[in-house]
C-alpha cells in the first residue's frame, strides 16, 4: 500500500517580492516624484512680475522712435496674447 504524503505548503512570500505590488505602488510613487520635480522647477524658474513703471517708460521711449525702429520696439512690447496671435501673420495694429 502506498501512503501519500503531502508536501508542506510554501511559506508566505515577503511583500516586496510580489511583482503586482510594485505595479500598484510604483505608478502612484512615480507620479508623486514627478509632481515634486515639477513643483521644484516651477518655483526655481518662476517668471518675473511685470514692472508697470518700467513698461510704461519703455513704451514711451518706443513711441518716440521713428520708422522701422519704432515698429520693432512696439512689437516687442505687445501683450502676449497679441504677439501670439500675430506669430503666424505678423500684422502690427495701427495706433489709435
Image: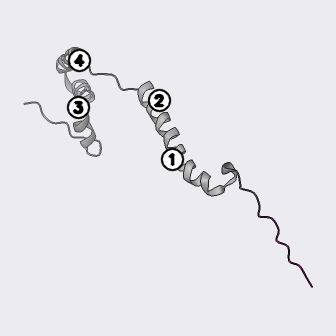
Q: Are marks 4 and 3 in contact (CB under 8 Å)?
A: no
Q: Where, by quadrant of the figure, is residue 23 drawn?
A: bottom right
Q: Earlier in the sequence, mark 1 or mark 4?
A: 1
The percent coordinates of residue 78 (x first, y second) are: 23, 30
> Range of the magenta residues?
1-9
Q: Are marks 3 and 1 in contact (CB under 8 Å)?
A: no
Q: Which residue is mark 3?
A: 79
Q: Where 76 falls versus 8 (above or below)?
A: above
SS of the residue under disc 4: helix
**In front of the other: label 4 or label 3?**
3
SS of the residue under disc 3: loop
Q: Nearer the viewer, residue 10 or 17?
A: 10
The local crowd at label 3, few if under 14, some if 14 to 19, many if 20 or more residues have their Cα within 10 Å, is few
- In three-dimensional space, the C-alpha distance between marks 2 and 1, rounded to whole angstroms, equals 18 Å
Q: Earlier in the sequence, mark 2 or mark 3?
A: 2
SS of the residue under disc 2: helix
Q: Which residue is mark 2?
A: 40
Q: Earlier in the sequence, mark 3 or mark 1?
A: 1
Q: How is the image coloured?
A: one colour
- In three-dimensional space, the C-alpha distance between marks 2 and 3, rounded to whole angstroms, equals 27 Å
The residue drawn where x is 26% and y is 45% is 89
Q: Which quadrant of the rendered structure holds the N terminus?
A: bottom right
Q: Which quadrant of the rendered structure holds the C terminus?
A: top left
SS of the residue under disc 1: helix
Q: Which residue is mark 4?
A: 58
The residue drawn where x is 89% and y is 79% is 3
Q: Earlier in the sequence, mark 2 or mark 1?
A: 1
Residue 28's label in the rendered image is 1
Q: Are marks 1 and 4 in contact (CB under 8 Å)?
A: no
Q: Is residue 45 left or right of residue 16?
A: left
Q: Are marks 2 and 1 in contact (CB under 8 Å)?
A: no
The residue drawn where x is 27% and y is 28% is 76
Amino acid at each position: 500500500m502506498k501512503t501519500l504524503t503531502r508536501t508542506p505548503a510554501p511559506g508566505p512570500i515577503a511583500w516586496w517580492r510580489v511583482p503586482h505590488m510594485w505595479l500598484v505602488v510604483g505608478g502612484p510613487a512615480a507620479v508623486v516624484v514627478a509632481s515634486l520635480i515639477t513643483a521644484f522647477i516651477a518655483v526655481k524658474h518662476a517668471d518675473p512680475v511685470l514692472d508697470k513703471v518700467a513698461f510704461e517708460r519703455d513704451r514711451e521711449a518706443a513711441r518716440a522712435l521713428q520708422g522701422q525702429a519704432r515698429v520693432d520696439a512696439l512689437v516687442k512690447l505687445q501683450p502676449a496674447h497679441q504677439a501670439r496671435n500675430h506669430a503666424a501673420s505678423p500684422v502690427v495694429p495701427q495706433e489709435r
